Amino acid sequence: MDWSGGSLKESNKFIAMLILQAAKTVEGVLYLESTIDRVDARSVESLRALAEDASELRRVLIDELHKTFVTPLDREDIHQLVTRMDDILDLIEDCAQSISLYDVRAPTPEMKRLAEICVGCAEKVQAGVGGLSDLRDARAILAACADIDKLESEADHVMRTAIGKLFREEPDAKEIIKLRSIYELLETITDRCEDVANIVEGIVLEHS
């Protein structure tokens, strides 16, 4: 896909690409949530294609960083933001692959709740990154970041509770291993969203 044309040639092309990457993150996690009870090879392939598309966008953005003398934000911040969001999509793909490979046909309520929290985190990432186009609205940006922190804490609690329940109630060791892996992948998605929030907070504070 060609990311070099149109509005991306404007001075705010880096912000535009970051916003596009955030939108792809939301698209990926919404797709995972909507298919979590019927993940198959087609689902995995769809998410793989989305992750590859986002990785290509990351490569283009980094190439533009090398070629551009003046950037709207610190170069390291731009690099870290696009990299962490790319990580989120990779984790979404990994999660779908694990569900498919492990043949998890009946997602637990905890899996579904973690997926819902991942959606909430990704939507707040989109809000926070989108706010970078107008840093004058710092309060709204920081509020989105604070919401991500709360959601990540909830995800951590859900994951720990779910794993504890597995060890107490699940007699099949293989099932424990499979579900624990998926819980941890879903929770790690929220960790990477929190990484994005921390970077965005730093940018807002730097420009306030």
Image (cartoon, rainbow, N blue to C red):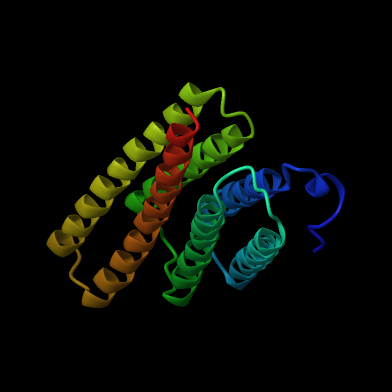
Image height of 55 relative to 205, above or below? below
Residue 82 lies in quadrant: bottom right
Drawn side of residue 186 relative to residue 204, left or right: left
Q: Residue 32: percent from the left, percent from the top? A: 54, 55
At horizontal 27% and vertical 53% (from top left) the residue drawn is: 159
At x 43%, y 27%, the residue is: 143
For the image, the number of numbered tags is 0
Quarter placement of the N terminus: bottom right
Of all residues, the one furthest to the left in this rendering is: 168
**Left or right side of 87 for 61:** right
Toward the viewer: 169 or 145?
A: 145
Point 32% across, 46% down: residue: 155
> Is residue 115 at least partly visible in the picture?
no
Q: Which residue is drawn at 46% across and 65% down?
A: 95
Q: Where is residue 81 in the image (x, y as percent from the top left)?
A: 52, 52
Vertical position of residue 40 compared to residue 146: above or below: below
**Left or right: 80, with 148 as reference point:** right
Q: Quadrant of residue 133?
A: top right
Determine whether 128 is above or below 102 in the image.
above
- Quarter-wise, where is residue 46 in the image? bottom right
Residue 128: horizontal and vertical position, in percent? Answer: 52, 36
Q: Can residue 121 be seen in this view?
A: yes
Image position, residue 7 (x, y; %):
82, 44
As drawn, which residue projects farthest toward the front?
69
The residue nearer to you, when weighing 116 against 145, is 145
